[in-house]
Amino acid sequence: MTQDDSELVRMLRAELAGPEPPIRAELDEIVRRGRRAIGMRRVGVAAAVFVAVASIGAGGVALRGIEEPAQPLGAASPTKAPPTSTPLVNRSVPMISVCDPWPDQDRVINSSRADVDRALSRLADVMKRGTATESTNMDIKPEYIASFLDGGFGIVRVTSTVDKSRNYIVYLQVNGYIGDPGGSFSESEAAGETCRMSNHKTLSDGTIVQSYQSSQDRFGGLLLALRVHTSQHRLYTLTVEKSGDDTVPPSMTLGELTTIGETVAKEG
Amino acid sequence: MARRDDDFAEFFAARFDGARRMAYALCGNWQEAEELTQAAFVSMYARWSAIHVDTVDAYLRKVVTRGFLDTKRRRRRREHTVAELPELSVEYELSSVEDRPSLLVALQKVPPRQRAVLVLRFLQDLSVQQVADALRCSTGTVKSQTARGLTALRTAYEATNGDVWLPKVVGCER
């Protein structure tokens, strides 16, 4: 946390310590509601037990009704086919949810700070060149903010004095990973989620690029995200969020973000 | 039951105020904060015998935070009719953070989950691991959400007050 952040938190604490209205809650009311909750829970448990017992009983009766006739003595029992073996699942595959831009650190290997620094510098350079917008006359001023939080995490804020839709914040996280990233992708994972996979491709060197966008404000403003698994077992995660005026969505496209991600991953 | 109620009453007297203040930081409204805190204490009473004395404070924070996030997730305010009309209180009206420009106003513009991380981490002084436990996520998520939350808070504060908050920028011109 920077000194500015510390000051921000100190001010917030001071403000929160201000006067407050009197407490209106009464212990008796809370206890009464609590007892009601206990009663409801007991009723629920009793009902569940009753249903379970009734189901077991009904199932037993039904099974007895369709019981096979007894085999005559000496008759050869039919040969049972051996159970078909199910293919083994590679348990080392990191099952990273497509819609979760922040991989669980328990399942990834942290990169060194030097790796993050290099990738972050690279990202800042790419953004400064205007790759994101493919335009050089937008007066884009990317900021390279050294904010690592010892978690392989960095931020590049992009601001434009000309076009507010060019204002966004790109978050970069660099991690290592274990397992086969190809195995972690599944269309079914995205089903029913609030974000959807937009692109999934494998480059010639084995790098896998997954891009997706959220359909609602699930991650607090996340609009686009990109995950790049390189063959060197580095995982680059880039997310783009709005910055400044909330009413103006950023104009970066998934294609542009993909280009940035591939460039950072290749040279980062 | 009497012993149980005595213990709970003692806990209620000692912790309700702090929990309500935390809920206020999360939702920015004293009335909603009171409801959140009451719901948390009701839930705790129903499970009082199963809660370990060493973890009771952590449990309370967890219940308040999750209650807040659940409310936001459902995107609807719990509204129910009551027989008694609430007393009109000028202090209550003014205590809403919507009415005065401040950091608390800015905090309400931070996305709920990031806000929860900031409140737990910096206002409740929890460690990264403790916040991760409370929100059932990884420590990496807590760290990233912290960074994003601070950025969002600063941006919202600047937008509200028109002040220029100088970020620590290095390495831009390399």
Image: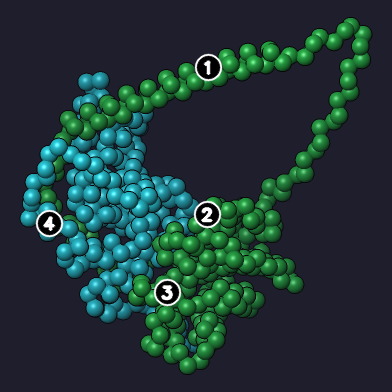
Nearest the camera: A234 or A27?
A: A27
Q: Is residue A227 above or below residue B93?
A: below
Specify whether residue A127 is in view.
Answer: yes
Q: Where residue B35 sits in the image (x, y, percent)? A: 23, 44
Q: CA distance from mark 4 to mark 2?
A: 39 Å
Q: Where residue B5 sits in the image (x, y, percent)? A: 22, 26
Q: Left or right of B116: which side holds B28? A: left
Q: Which residue is mark 3?
A: A249
- Residue type indicated by callout 3: Pro
Residue B93, which numbered label? 4
Q: Look at the numbered discs 1 and 2 and tell me whether their residues touch, using CB distance below 8 Å.
A: no
Say few, some or many: other residues with alpha carbon within 10 Å of mark 3 (under 14 / 14 to 19 / 20 or more).
some
Q: Which residue is mark 2?
A: A193
Q: Look at the numbered discs 1 and 3 and tell me whether their residues touch, using CB distance below 8 Å.
A: no
Eye-nearest disc, 1 or 4: 1
Residue drawn 27% across the image and 66% down it: B106
Chain B display color:
cyan
Q: CA distance from mark 1 to mark 3?
A: 56 Å
Task: Determine the chain carrying the residue at label 2.
Answer: A
Chain coloured green: A
Q: Which residue is mark 1?
A: A54
Q: CA distance from mark 3 to mark 2?
A: 21 Å
Say few, some or many: other residues with alpha carbon within 10 Å of mark 1 (under 14 / 14 to 19 / 20 or more).
few
Task: Determine the chain carrying the residue at label 3.
Answer: A
Element marked by disc 2: loop
Residue drawn 40% across the image and 85% down it: A163
Choose the circle earlier in sequence order: 3 or 2.
2
Q: Left or right of A264: which side holds B171? A: left
- Residue A211, image quadrant: bottom right
Nearest the camera: B95 or A150?
A: B95
Say few, some or many: other residues with alpha carbon within 10 Å of mark 2 (under 14 / 14 to 19 / 20 or more).
some
